[in-house]
Image: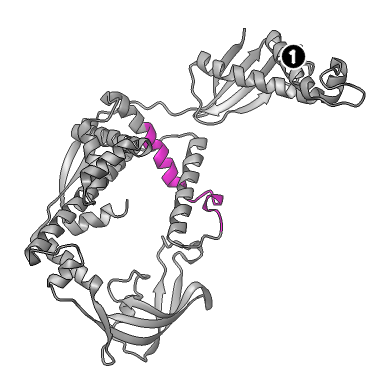
Amino acid sequence: MMQASLENLEGLKRRITVTVPADDMKKAYAASLRNVAKNARIDGFRKGHVPTKVLEMHFGPKIYSDALDKVVQQSLPQAFEQCQVEPAGVPSIALDDKANLDGSSEVIYTAEFEVMPVLEEKPLSEMPLTVVQSKISDADIDTMIENLRAQQGKWQVNDDAAAADGKLAKIDFVGRVNGETFEGGSANDFSLVIGRTAMIPGFSEQIIGHKAGDKFTIQVTFPEDYHAEELKGKPAEFDITVNSVSDQKLPELNDEFFAQFGVKEGGLEAFRADLLRNMEREQKRALHVTQRNNVCDALLKYFGEFDVPADAVENERKRMCEMDMRRFKSYGIPVKEDLAADPSVHKDDAVNAVRLRCIIDLYVKKSGLQAPSDDAINEELSLVADAYEDPEAVKEAIRKNKEQFANIRNQAFERDLFNYIQNSAKCEVKEETFSELLRVGQTA
């Protein structure tokens, strides 16, 4: 009978020593021998009729190796069950080198692995949690209308205009760090809308006041969190040439403008009502994302730092890097090398993700939740379907698609769990404007 013993090593590391009886190894060796004998081709012998001694002479290491693999695959799950332990990653196997290579002796091997941490439950009633609330005001609708007008506006070159907030400056620039140009630091006829186009801090501000034909040099410093590692925190200078400055002519609020957004009747009043419905949908989505982020942050802070398995962290880190690579590819952003090759990329994010998974598993058991509620499923379906002309048809189509509906159910289960956590926590309400809320929600 197989025997197994468990040792606790440092931190989350464990070692199981497994002893497989000689009889089990003999059976596995015999089965491996038969498999080899079926297909072995050796000069002077018919296929399937090669003597055992000849087979062992030619294929001995393979026969023994295959048999060994089989007994390990069969015995290791039994050893985990016997020792009541679950590995968090792929175990590292080490074999005792005293076994007979003819499969006639018992086999002893060890498996080293990490386990998930066992957390002590903490009362949610003592966990501080910020709950965000938001209302859409008439001023928010006014701002949205002006944003839409700006999107549809036409630019007209103004030879006498100086660059200012809201104006479009077409510029050439050449950047240098330590006197050397760098990749991505130069452009011709670049379109810069002052106050809107995202640039290095201080870049746009130094363009203000300049007119077409002006040539000058500005000084900036790259942020510490800049995406290019070699530029983080580095001072730089840019030679600037202003080619033109344009004013924007905004469209009138008339039926022609409203029709571009699907409102063909009812004028401004109907347009504002349609905007409000769209904004409420975005508000609902952003509130959900924001609150989810707040709950995750609160849980991580409440439990603090604790050890998690290195394999689980590395797998999560690679998954995050793969998601980045796919996102960059979809945006047409070239990536020269595999992001996961740098072990520091997403390391902290991955650690937090695994820690959060451990914490959430704890409260899944505490909550008693086993399946998502109908209300949560409907909420998740609405987040997807309400943007379409016929939401009910979209919901029905999702329900019929097994994969899509499974995703909806998973998200609904998470919604129920996070509602349970929020309802149990020590909450503080924070009011945010629609614009503040959307900035957070859009980063999810």
Q: Residue at x 65, y 13 (%)?
A: 20
Residue 354 highlighted magenta (yes or no): yes
Q: Residue at x 21, y 43 (%)?
A: 392
Instruction: Give SS at disc 1.
Output: helix
367 vs 128: above or below: above
Quarter where residue 381 is shown:
top left
**Residue 245 place in picture, x, y as percent:** 30, 85
- The foreground one among 371 and 139 is 371
258 vs 82: above or below: below
Label 1 crowding class (10 Å Cα cut-off): few <14, some 14-19, many 20+?
Answer: some
Q: Main secondary structure of the magenta part?
A: helix
Residue 422 highlighted magenta (yes or no): no
205 vs 399: above or below: below
Residue, disc 1? 30
Mark yes or no: residue 425 visible: no
Q: Tell me the magenta residue range.
A: 337-358
**Residue 145 place in picture, x, y as percent:** 16, 67
- The foreground one among 149 and 7 is 149
**Residue 5 place in picture, x, y as percent:** 57, 15
Q: Residue at x 46, y 62 (%)?
A: 332
